[in-house]
Amino acid sequence: MTEKKEFKCRIVSKEFLTPDTAYIGIECPEAASSAVPGQFVNISCSRFLKRPFGVASVSDDGRILYIGIKVVGKGTEELSGLMPGDEISMLAPLGKGFDLTGFDSYILVSGGTGVFPVNFAYETLKSSGKKVAVVQGFRNASQVILNDPSFVLTTDEGDAGIKGTCIAGLDSLDLNSFPNAAVLCVGPIPMMKAAGAWAEEHGLKCFVSMEQRMGCGIGICLCCIVKVKADNEDGYVNLRCCKDGPVFDYAEVVW
């Protein structure tokens, strides 16, 4: 895996998937060709700290990586306004990605901005010939993005797909069709806790990508701590989401 570096990059494409969510293509061959699903990038804006975004896809020629930006504050609002031709400063690739080789099949679960890293995992698994299912959860139909007809779609309001949470989608799967499966999950904490509990109930390993608030993104500032179980007096150790994660074994996280 290529060591993280800071790159001066050029925006090559942008589209709004919803009124508050932009999908942006960034030309950066070195980072794009080395990124793996579950990793993220840190992009500078005029605010003090860089903003982290999971890699959502990589072009077939390995020159362009894609990210999704949901506007949640001034920094993401600024970055969502980037246009093709604009230059940015980007630190990439960052973090530890998903294990996409240790199992025969995979069940991917996503909600919120988790659809972006899960999309990259899905594309990678499909291209490698692995058996894969995707369960997506959204609040309602207006929030649905990066959806494929083969995915199991759920909405809280029931105006698209199965009414209910991702767990309703998971319950609709025939697990006999997924030998030696692992569950990979990215999304809000309550959703990941529920998906992990569902996986344990069905005897499956589950790996989650923690979306902590981050400062530096490279393990120095220690503001993105995740508590992980340990055999010591406290019963846990503090790990850095950006450096030791963001992917962790669900069973090892102190929820």
Image (tube, rainbow, N blue to C red):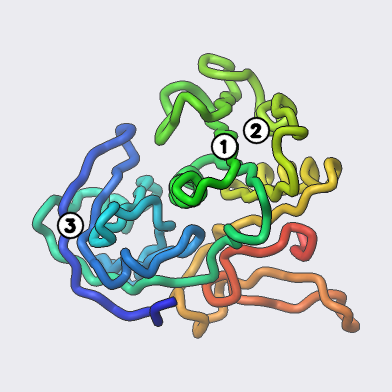
Q: Earlier in the sequence, mark 3 or mark 1?
A: 3
Q: CA distance from mark 2 to mark 1?
A: 10 Å
Question: Is residue 74 at least partly visible in the picture?
Answer: no
Image: 57 above or below 99 = above
Residue type (three-letter) at the residue carrying disc 2: Cys
Left or right of 5 in this view: 185? right
* Residue wearing tag 3: 11
* Residue wearing tag 1: 134
State the residue in front, 130 or 50: 130
Q: Are marks 2 and 3 in contact (CB under 8 Å)?
A: no
Q: How many marks?
A: 3
Q: Are marks 2 and 1 in contact (CB under 8 Å)?
A: no
* Residue wearing tag 2: 166
Q: CA distance from mark 2 to mark 3?
A: 33 Å
Q: Earlier in the sequence, mark 2 or mark 1?
A: 1
Residue at (40, 82) in percent of width and height: 3
Residue at (24, 52) in percent of width and height: 25
Say which quadrant the C terminus sits in: bottom right
Residue 226: horizontal and vertical position, in percent? Answer: 66, 69
